[in-house]
Amino acid sequence: MALLREETNYTHVIAIDFGTGASGYGIAPKLLDSSQKPKIEVFNPCDESDDQKTPTAILFDNSFKFLAFGSQAISRYAELLDDEETALLFQTYKMHLLHMDKNAISADNRELSLMTVISQTLKFIADKAMGKLAEQVGKVIPTKIRWVLTVPALWDEEHKQFMRKAALEAGLIDSLNSTQLLLCLEPEGASIQCREDSEESLKEQLVKPNVVMVLDCGGGTVDITVHRLLCGQGERFLCEELLPSSGGSEWGSRFVDKYFEEFLKELFGPEVFGMYTRNAMARLEVLKHFEMMKRKFCPGTDERSRLQLSYLGEGLTSQKLTELIKAYNQNHPDATLRLRGASGVDLPPVLMKSFYAPLFAKIKNKVKELLDAAEEKKAPVNFIFMVGGFSESPYLKAEIKKAFEKPNLQILVPRRPQVSVIRGACMFGLNPRSINSRVSKKTYGINTLTTYDAERHSEDKKVIIEGEEFCEDVFDAFVKKNESVGIDEVHTKIYCPVRSKQTVMRIIFYCTEKESVTYVDEDGVSMLGELSIDIGRPFQSVDDKTVKVTLQFGQTYIYATATNRSGTEIRNCEFKFDCK
């Protein structure tokens, strides 16, 4: 895999924001000069009249053939169920990637390869984007497109590798390591957008050395970055990462739904809740209605949180619902429900707040931890930008402001927080060097053999190869945790084969949360992947098979290359990450 080259032979950037709850894309023509303001358009792949995003949902028939995506998938699924037919509807399947699951699970609990589900998602959105661009400019040359995929900052290399493979299967790129594809960390894209799209009065404040935190609250994850600005007034966005990106993988708005359904399970009891989970269409409608309730809910307002359960039809009569409410209220005198009409239920604010409480506690604790860490570095945060669909919640905005806003710390929400990441990803695609440096979240190194030293090495690690004593399983670090790594910074090491007839060198990469380790088999060290290098023929000397390995860790993705003794890049060299 070659080191990142600044590919400039493109005409447009197309950014795809594949989210847990909603997805969309943006298009931006290449800038002719650095002073030009980006022209970015954001599109809903399923509805041209709506410039937000569409629900992330994909539908396959019973033969696993793609049928529809987004809001069209949900409505088509409803029609099929009405006709007493079946199909596979997948939602929130991005969370399966977080756990590196092999398969995604449909609404009716059937399974399909996660790679198929995600690659078909990317293909659908990419085809829509290319069609839209062709409408605007005429003929489009696919090789002249710079693709940008947004990924959570919390993801590890195997998750990013999976997305590159999915992009290859979807036909966006023609090789796994194509320079046509960039990965944009979601909160980094939002950080760029928040500064570049802000009003002039605010932009004048968003200059060096101010520190900005981006709180990207989506459907599945909450990603947080802390950047120190390096740009002056009137200059293009430039920053460095002050603290490693962090957050929580299951803190997003979809997990409010999880706690809501736990309430339904208690309210309904086993029989009615079983009917609810089996009735896929009724469940979709109840959750859709609850989504509207979430967007309005804010304690202290007069807005009622009225849940409509008519979607369950004859399975939940008014009499049955009355009985269930009475039984629930007896067990919860401080959070009583009220029946409204035949099938409506008023949920008290204390109950609604309980759905959010576990998530808000985690979010606020992490924000405080990062604010304190910035203070310790004598670089206090001046601005917190809240982006992502969950940031549209009046309750979340109110809680963050209440907990952290003060005269020298402003909490700001862009006008359209749901599309901040898409717009920022387009800006990142136009200028990938916007982020000057990043802080390593882990210590990265390789498993190597080194000359045995009795004073430094354990006896049980000693091996003898062709008459020489070596120490095996040594962790040779390239980059250490919390180390600031520049975007163009390279790390180079020279390796020699230990056997004279060796023709392939396998360099195994490891990572750990610790800042320093000695051996790769210590607790907390895990295999990341391997670099497989063709180093020559058996009859060549060991010196002729010497390899120089160079890695870049300052990008959004680890890049590696290998060269031989003469300095020629070894073409048969592949960096394989340990992913399914």
Image: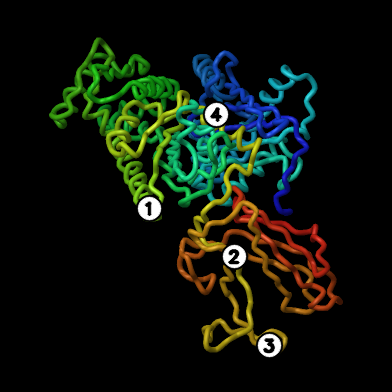
> In x, y percent, where is residue 243?
46, 51
Q: Do the residues labelled 3 and 2 touch (CB within 8 Å)?
A: no
Between 335 and 483, the one lying in front of the other is: 483
Residue type indicated by callout 1: Ala
Of the numbered discs in the image, which one, if any, rests on residue 161? none
Between 538 and 240, the one lying in front of the other is: 240
> In x, y percent, where is residue 303?
27, 17
Mark 3 or mark 1: whose residue is earlier in sequence = 1
Instruction: State the CA–CA distance, disc 3 to disc 1.
Output: 48 Å
Q: Do the residues labelled 1 and 4 touch (CB within 8 Å)?
A: no
Residue lying at 74% horizontally and 53% vertically, measured from the top left: 2
Q: Name the residue under label 3.
A: 468
Mark 1 or 2: the one toward you: 1
Mark 3 or mark 2: whose residue is earlier in sequence = 3
Residue type indicated by callout 3: Glu
Instruction: State the CA–CA distance, disc 2 to disc 4.
Output: 36 Å
Q: Mark 2 points at which residue?
A: 478
Mark 2 or 4: the one toward you: 2
Image: 521 above or below 384? below
Instruction: State the CA–CA distance, disc 1 to disc 2.
Output: 25 Å
Q: Do the residues labelled 3 and 1 touch (CB within 8 Å)?
A: no
Q: Do the residues labelled 2 and 4 touch (CB within 8 Å)?
A: no
Q: How crowded is mark 4: few (under 14 residues within 10 Å), some or many (20 or more)?
A: many
Q: Mark 1 points at which residue?
A: 373
Mark 3 or 1: the one toward you: 1
Residue type indicated by callout 4: Ser
Between 579 and 558, the one lying in front of the other is: 558
Of the numbered discs in the image, which one, if any, rests on residue 23? 4
Q: Do the residues labelled 1 and 2 touch (CB within 8 Å)?
A: no
